[in-house]
């Protein structure tokens, strides 16, 4: 009993240290957002700002059309999350429950996609979007215009699929008892009905996990919007952060103020989905 | 079951079509690639055709965005047959990624505002077009600053038309000079005087340096710039010779320059990372001198150092020299509208537009005809800027320039932290650069 208490104590101390290490960048971001540039550049470091002021937030928000940037990020993130939840869970269900020729090869190909860095597929994806038929002045062969470049649709389409989401859903659905499928079949339900009326309503945990990971990834994505957008009309919050950076200098105080505002929606999303997130990770067999 | 499948297929097709139509419906994307379209409303063109061009600028500063937007509007008003879409992208790797994607997919912009360093990589790939045929009969050619044209030239061909010069000038704190018993009106002009000033300006608390003379950095991604300044002041052409790829960082003069920097460091400096000029101890009054840009000068002079700082002419040991970054307008090698692009470049480079640029952004005009007017505006400061542009050289325009920077930065950090002596560090660096050259 005594040993257990000691181990528990050590565990708590280690976890506290680990948490502090992980929280340090966030804490630094938060405190820097209240400092003046003089204080940031000062050789004497103060964790707590000498004078709390919201002027950085006011200046940061005044330096661009932030309502538009937040709206753009929101459109892209919400659309990508909704469509990816739908497509990934359907594909995950198919791989977990349907027997069809080539399913193993298809799944292996998906797994290869899981190991592929986004930078490798960026150019081919960009070309597919640029050559999208009958869009942006393109003809049926995808020539003559710019396809889906600089459009929300072009930004969203490549984000709605994902090997990780399909893999997660497949693992999750494989834990469902087969008796459920058999009962549904006896009641005359087809595969689509079984998915929509039995599997989907019982997928809250995995969908919340997926929504959170996808949402954070899309919200924080920088590279894809960078190459796909050309105008303020489609600029996302992450791209807008570069406004505070010149060739040689960075306006750290305003950049950190904007960064605090940008992470807020993700923190709220995490707090709302936290319960399901842990459950989803555990039940999908990922640890 | 079949009916259900058919319904699902119909829904899928509808969604796909809807996405396609949404894409078509976006007005903005049609302007990405230059195109010629017929417009009945065109007033300036006899055949009613409007040529659409895309202008991409490196950088996202609001002031420059406002400036370019205004210039484009004025140009379009004077040239109703040309429509220019303004685009911008952050500096550095982001800009390279954007350009690479554009060129790889055939959607590259028509006019590009980017740095001199990009020429070494993009000219050999044919991504920048030569301007020789346009410049040949251009009245502005003889009036342009010789060095500005030279910096935009590779193999005797002009590729870039300079728009913004960014020379590094010697900036010093007059108040600190006075406190140290130095004449604030006579800043150092050569290395000996710099050493003398360094000695007098250093203040120590025990072993700790609390104030230094020359605020030179000890690490970071811009160490190569600092090294090239001292190296060129000692008579070395550049980090590598652009003409024949000879590595110059380990010539005796270059080693001497590195030794000089080491000597300054050993006398006592406040360590800082050259990647971010915000860290420069000069900005917080902990260094009395530094090399900085005109923009740095303006930033520092508007803060706590207001009225206390001044600019001085570039130093020399054997040659008066400094680093001079330059931002150019490039014509895309892929554009189908070279004539229209040149009309825009010519418009931006007129004396009138240059002067407007000076008035709005403070950037030095690059025409001889504006020299006197420019200097008369602020004789003390503008004379230095003008001299620095004229004697400045920039990054080597070679395809392996980035490797050169990394290798030189690494060597300089070793020297500044005493890990290696200048001769060894630079010889090792030169070998690495030579390997890059050999692999071309």
Image: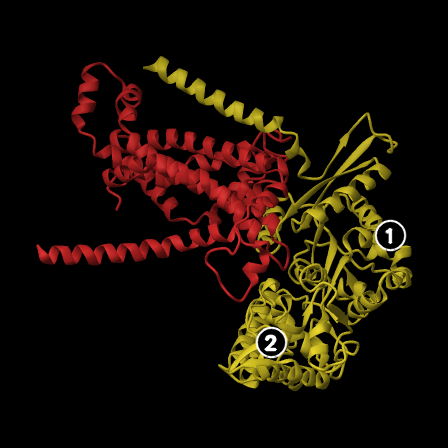
Asked whether the residues under the numbered discs 2 and 1 touch, taking CB atoms below 8 Å apart as contact, a structural biologist would say no
Secondary structure beneath label 2: strand
Which residue position is annotated with label 2?
B211
Along the line of sight, the residue nearer the viewer: A216 or B12: A216
At which x and y percent is residue A108? 32, 42
The quadrant holding residue A98 is top left
B168 up-or-down from B58: above or below: below
* Image chain in red: A
Colouring of the image: by chain
Q: Chain B is drawn in which colour?
A: yellow
Residue at image x 62%, y 31%? A136
A248 up-or-down from B231: above or below: above
* Circle nearer the N terminus (2, 1): 2
Along the line of sight, the residue nearer the viewer: B385 or A224: B385
Q: Which mark is residue A56?
A: none
At which x and y percent is residue B203? 60, 80
Q: Is residue A162 visible?
A: no
Which residue position is annotated with label 1?
B350
Along the line of sight, the residue nearer the viewer: B85 or B257: B257
């Amino acid at each position: 009993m005594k040993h257990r208490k000691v181990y528990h104590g050590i565990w708590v101390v280690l976890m506290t240290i680990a948490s502090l290490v992980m929280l340090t960048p966030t804490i630094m971001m938060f405190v820097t957002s209240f400092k003046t540039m003089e204080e940031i550049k000062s050789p004497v470091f103060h964790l707590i700002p000498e004078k709390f002021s919201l002027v950085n937030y006011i200046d940061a928000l005044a330096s661009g059309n932030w309502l538009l940037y937040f709206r753009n990020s929101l459109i892209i993130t919400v659309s990508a999350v909704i469509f990816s939840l739908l497509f990934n869970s359907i594909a995950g269900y198919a791989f977990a429950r349907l027997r069809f020729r080539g399913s193993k090869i298809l799944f292996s190909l998906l797994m290869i996609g899981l190991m592929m860095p986004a930078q490798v597929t960026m150019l081919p994806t960009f070309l597919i979007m640029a050559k999208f038929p009958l869009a942006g002045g393109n003809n049926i062969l995808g020539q003559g215009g710019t396809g889906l470049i600089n459009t929300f649709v072009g930004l969203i389409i490549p984000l709605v699929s994902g090997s990780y989401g399909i893999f997660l859903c497949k693992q999750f659905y494989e834990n469902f008892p087969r008796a459920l499928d058999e009962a549904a079949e006896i009641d005359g339900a087809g595969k689509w009905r079984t998915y929509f009326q039995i599997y989907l309503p019982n997928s809250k945990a995995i969908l919340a996990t997926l929504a959170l990971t996808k949402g954070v990834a899309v919200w924080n994505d920088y590279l894809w919007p960078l190459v796909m957008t050309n105008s303020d009309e489609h600029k996302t919050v992450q791209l807008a952060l570069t406004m505070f950076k010149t060739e040689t200098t960075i306006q750290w105080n305003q950049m950190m103020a904007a960064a605090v505002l940008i992470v807020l929606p993700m923190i709220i999303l995490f707090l709302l989905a936290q319960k399901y997130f842990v459950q989803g990770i555990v039940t999908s067999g990922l640890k | 079951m079949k009916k259900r499948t058919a319904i699902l297929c119909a829904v899928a097709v509808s969604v796909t079509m809807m996405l396609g139509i949404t894409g078509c419906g976006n007005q903005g994307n049609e302007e990405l690639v230059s195109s010629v379209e017929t417009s009945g409303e065109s007033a300036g063109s006899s055949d009613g055709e409007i040529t659409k061009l895309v202008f991409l600028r490196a950088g996202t500063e609001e002031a420059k965005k406002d400036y370019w937007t205004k210039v484009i509007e004025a140009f379009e008003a004077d040239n109703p047959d040309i429509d220019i879409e303004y685009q911008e992208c952050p500096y550095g790797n982001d800009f390279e990624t954007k350009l690479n994607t554009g060129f790889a997919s055939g959607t590259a912009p028509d006019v590009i505002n980017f740095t001199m360093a990009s020429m070494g990589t993009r000219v050999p790939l044919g991504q920048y077009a030569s301007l020789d045929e346009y410049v040949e009969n251009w009245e502005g050619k003889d009036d342009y600053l010789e060095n500005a044209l030279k910096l935009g030239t590779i193999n005797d061909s002009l590729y870039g038309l300079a728009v913004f010069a960014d020379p590094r000038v010697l900036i010093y704190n007059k108040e600190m000079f006075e406190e140290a018993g130095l004449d604030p009106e006579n800043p150092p002009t050569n290395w000996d005087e710099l050493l003398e000033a360094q000695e007098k300006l250093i203040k120590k608390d025990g072993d700790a340096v609390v104030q230094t003379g020359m605020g030179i950095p000890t690490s970071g991604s811009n160490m190569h710039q600092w090294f090239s300044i001292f190296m060129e002041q000692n008579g070395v052409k550049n980090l590598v010779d652009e003409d024949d790829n000879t590595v110059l960082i380990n010539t005796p003069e270059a080693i001497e320059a590195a030794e000089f920097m080491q000597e300054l460091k050993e006398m006592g400096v406040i360590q800082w990372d050259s990647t971010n000029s915000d860290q420069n101890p000069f900005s917080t009054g902990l260094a009395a001198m530094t090399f900085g840009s005109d923009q740095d000068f303006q930033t520092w002079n508007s803060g706590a150092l207001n009225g206390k700082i001044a600019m001085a002419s570039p130093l020399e040991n054997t040659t008066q020299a400094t680093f001079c970054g330059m931002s150019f307008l490039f014509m895309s090698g892929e554009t189908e509208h070279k004539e229209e692009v040149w009309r825009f470049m010519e418009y931006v480079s007129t004396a009138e537009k240059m002067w407007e640029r000076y008035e709005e952004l403070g950037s030095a005009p690059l025409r001889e005809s504006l020299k006197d007017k420019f200097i008369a505006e602020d004789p003390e400061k503008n004379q230095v800027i003008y001299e620095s542009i004229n004697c400045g050289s920039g990054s080597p325009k070679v395809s392996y320039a980035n490797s050169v920077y990394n290798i030189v930065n690494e060597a300089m950090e070793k020297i500044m932290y005493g890990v290696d002596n200048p001769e060894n560090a630079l010889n090792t660096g030169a070998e690495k650069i030579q390997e890059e050259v050999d692999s071309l």
